[in-house]
Image: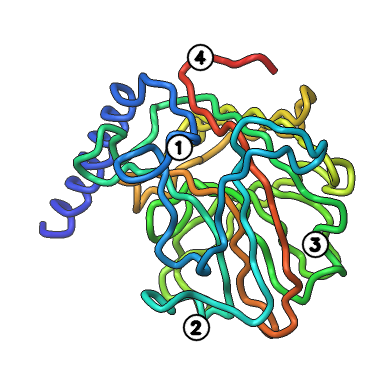
Amino acid sequence: MKCLLLITAMILGSVGTLAAQERHGTFTYNSMESGPNRAFFEKQRNLPNSYSRISTDPFSGEASGPVHQFQIRTGECGNQRDRGDCSYNAMRSELSENNHRGTRFGRIQPRQAWYEFDIGFPDGFPFGPRQTRSYYLLGQWHNGECPHLNFGIWGGRQSHVLHLRTNQIIPGHRHGDCQPADLIPVIDLREIEGRWAHFVVFIKWSTGDDGEVRVFVDGDQRVQYNGRTLVPEYTGRNHFDFGIYLAHADSLNRVRPATLYYRDIRRSRRQPPI
């Protein structure tokens, strides 16, 4: 009887969260609205002085609107306040969506939404054989425990491909409860290295098979995914993080420095120009 009540409560909680998603998120946000009580904030585990906003286009050298610049460095992890990444041989420089309880941005995403951003990989960005054995996460919709979806580079020193990954909870797994589910190739990064690439992403958030993700890069559709887009155990939280997170390096002292650029991260209920 107790088990039945618990299952019923979980189902009702999930339905309530999805109903809230239907009502919430009618605004459009812009990532340049950052700082205290703004749309995005620097993550506590960031390397010191690893994030900055610059006003020069890193590819043309001309003055431009604000650009997010993220950097990681050899041999460093965490900071004086939070050393948690060190246990994973990890380092990060990220912004996180400010959707904690009590803010006007809420704790979840709309039931479905369009996301767009420009991302810039400088020539020589250390992926594949240019980087020590590790993996990158470069943008993720997170719940604080196990990301719902993330963009990243997996496959160690053999991979040049940006993937989209869904995740799942497998209790008792020897590598931790949060495990990959689907791994979907998006684009070979050598195609977009040394310039801005424009991403448009449509997501219908769901714990069932009616979920959907479409990814467009520079106007070309690269992904059509249908299936679960939420981790069912953690539907009550969903925030977007972006920047560089490098994890499970074979040695922090062998990590090659990297710089990544983002600009104009937006979310809207309406489809933007593709």
Q: Is residue 55 above or below residue 134?
A: above
Where is residue 97 drawn, in percent x and y?
A: 41, 44
Amino acid carrying mark 2 in the image: Ser
**Is disc 3 surrounded by few (<14), some (14 to 19) or many (20+) residues within 10 Å?**
many
Q: Mark 4 points at which residue?
A: 270
Label 1 – label 4 distance at C-alpha: 23 Å
- Residue 214 in picture, x, y percent from top left: 64, 29
Give me the residue at 39% from left, 61% from top: 145
Q: Distance between the residues labelled 4 and 3?
A: 34 Å
Label of residue 87 in the image: 2
What residue type is disc 4 on? Arg
* Mark 1, residue position: 208
Give the x, y percent position of residue 197.
76, 35
Q: What element carries label 1?
A: loop
Mark 3 or 2, nearer chain start: 2
CA distance for labels 1 and 2: 34 Å
Instruction: Give the mark, 2 or 4, whose residue is nearer the N terminus.
Output: 2
Q: Is residue 90 above or below residue 166?
A: below
Residue annotated with mark 3: 127
Amino acid type of the residue tagged 1 in the rendering: Gly
Q: Is mark 4 on a helix, strand or loop?
A: loop
**Mark 1 or 2, nearer chain start:** 2
Left or right of 229: which side holds 107?
left
Point out the frontmost of discs 1 and 2.
2
